[in-house]
Structures are given as structure tokens and as C-alpha cells.
Image (cartoon, helix red, strand yellow):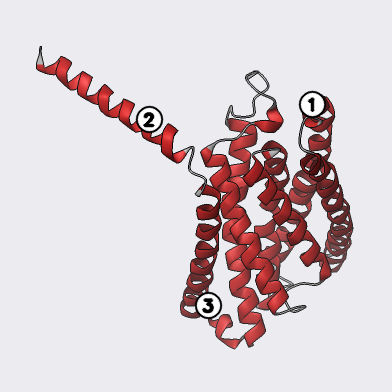
Amino acid sequence: MPVAEQSVMGIKSYQNQAENLVKNHLLADPLIPYSAIIAGILICRLIYDLTQSLSALYFKSYTCLNRIQRIEWNNRGMSTVHALFIAAMSLYFVYWSDLYADYRTTSAVTFRNSTLSTFTLGVSVGYFIADLAMILWLYPSLGGIEYVVHHSLSGIAVAYAMFSGEGQLYTYMVLISEVTTPEINMRWFLDTVGLKRSHAYLINGIVIFLAWLVARILLFVYMFFHVYLHYDQVIEMHAFGYFLVFVVPSVLAAMNLMWFGKILKGLKKTLTKKQ
């Protein structure tokens, strides 16, 4: 047998072994959700510590903050990294991956999942656990009851989608809204270091308005429309999953509208001062 042919057969053999490993072990591993949650918590701690170290080195204003402000600064650094990660992954799964594509008819869209989609949700659950723990520990310094409700509902919904494999598409649609978190955090950073009257603060406010309108208002409308179009598949879900698909996004949508009103009011106030 020629050497080239032997090489091709060898490569195919290794490929088959790798595929069997993924199929029989990784995909069937019941520890993946728990590993992802632990990884999410550990990553949050790592980002928190990195934010603390880098801020002390490169931001003079950081050293002038009091203890609670430093904790919130580090916490917002942590939430910004999570938001960038989960928003990017959510956009990938919803708009670029074919996992939830309508042309795939092998199973209902409400029951589709993969190892990567499950692991990604687990990392996000780890973040919600870590962040909620900090909010409760320092309550109400890092946020009031609305933050507790938001994180509790989000964490429960994401955890259910991760463990059950149901409704992951709608979970990712809602998680796209995390794209607004970096701008909200930037607003706090600018305000804290005394740049509330800067052009950067104004531009960031406009970005917040546009991002919030698209990701937390219009996208929720699209999600509910998608649920309407696929209601025959949604109704096949477990009763608790069915409940979460309607209740959690509805509560979050109401909170988003409330916050959007405050954002609009703040933006008008800022623009009036600039004139």
C-alpha cells in the first residue's frame, strides 16, 4: 500500500476516534452543565481580580475611590466581560449557527441544543450566581430589588434551558440584550471619575439609547412574534419551560420599558444642558 494512502487512512482513523470520543463521552457527559457553572464562577473571580489589579495600575482615579466604589468598579468590569461574551455567543447561535434554523426539520426548535450551547449557558449561570451573591452580600450598594429580581429570573430561566435543553433559542434571544451592559457600565465609570459633562458621556448616552431600543425593546417584540409563529412547538415543552418562555421575557420586557423611560429622560436632560 502506498505511503500516501496509508497516511490518509491513518488520518481517517484518528478522525473517527475523535468523533467517537466526542459523541460517546463529551456529548453524553452529565457533568458538562456543572463544569460550566463552576468555570463561569471561577472566570468571574479571575476577571474581578484582574480588573482590580489593572485598574490600580493604570487608573489614578481608582485609588481615590472608597471601598464600596472599588468593589462596584471591579464588579462592573466582571459584568462587562460576561456581557461581551454572552452577547457574542447569543448572536452566533441565533443568527449565524444553523442549530436553530427553520430549514432543519429533524426536531422542534424548542428542543434543539448542543454541547457548546449548553456549556455557554452554564458559564452564564455561573456569572448570575456570582453577581447575585455580590448584590445580596452588599445589598443595596450594588443594586436594589429590581436587580435581585432581574438576576433571579434570568438565572432560573438560563439554568432551566441548560439542564433541560428546552427553549435554548429563546434564552439566547433574551441574552442578546446583554449587549447594552458595557454601555451602562461605561456610563457609571465616566460618572464616577468625574466625566459626566464630557462628550464621551453624551456619546455613550446616545449609544445606550439606540442599543436599548434595538436589543431590549424591538428584539423582545421579535422574540414574542417568533414564539407566536412556532407556538405548536412551544406548547410541546414541559409545563415549567412553557411558563418560563412567557413569564420571564414578559417581566424582563416590562422592566426594560421602565428603564428605557429613565434612559430617555436622562438623555433629554443631558442634551438640554449641552444646548
Q: Nearer the viewer, mark 1 or mark 2?
A: 2
Q: Which corner quadrant of the image does residue 238 belong to?
A: top right
- Of 72 and 64, which appears nearest the observer? 72
**Residue at 70% in and 80% down:** 138
- Which mark lies nearer to you, 3 or 2? 2
Within the image, what quadrant is residue 184 found in?
bottom right
Q: List the residue tagged with mark 2.
A: 20
Which amino acid does the dot numbered 3 rest on?
Phe
Q: Which residue is mark 1?
A: 230
Q: Which of the 4 image quadrants contains residue 231?
A: top right
Q: Are marks 3 and 2 in contact (CB under 8 Å)?
A: no
Marks 1 and 2, Cα distance to the nearest angstrom? 34 Å
Using the image, determine if residue 47 lies above or below residue 52: above
Q: Is residue 103 left or right of residue 11?
A: right
Badge 1 or badge 2: first in the primary sequence? 2
Q: CA distance from mark 3 to mark 1?
A: 50 Å
Name the secondary structure under disc 1. Answer: loop
- Of the numbered discs 3 and 1, the one sitting upstream in the chain is 3
Quadrant housing the N terminus:
top left
Q: Which mark's residue is nearer the viewer, 3 or 1?
A: 1
Name the element at disc 2.
Answer: helix
Residue drawn 10% across the image and 13% down it: 2
Name the residue that disc number 3 marks.
59
Identify the residue shown where x is 79% and y is 31%.
Answer: 234
Q: Give amino acid for label 2.
A: Asn
- Expressed as whole percent of the image width and height from the top left, the position of residue 225 reads 83, 31
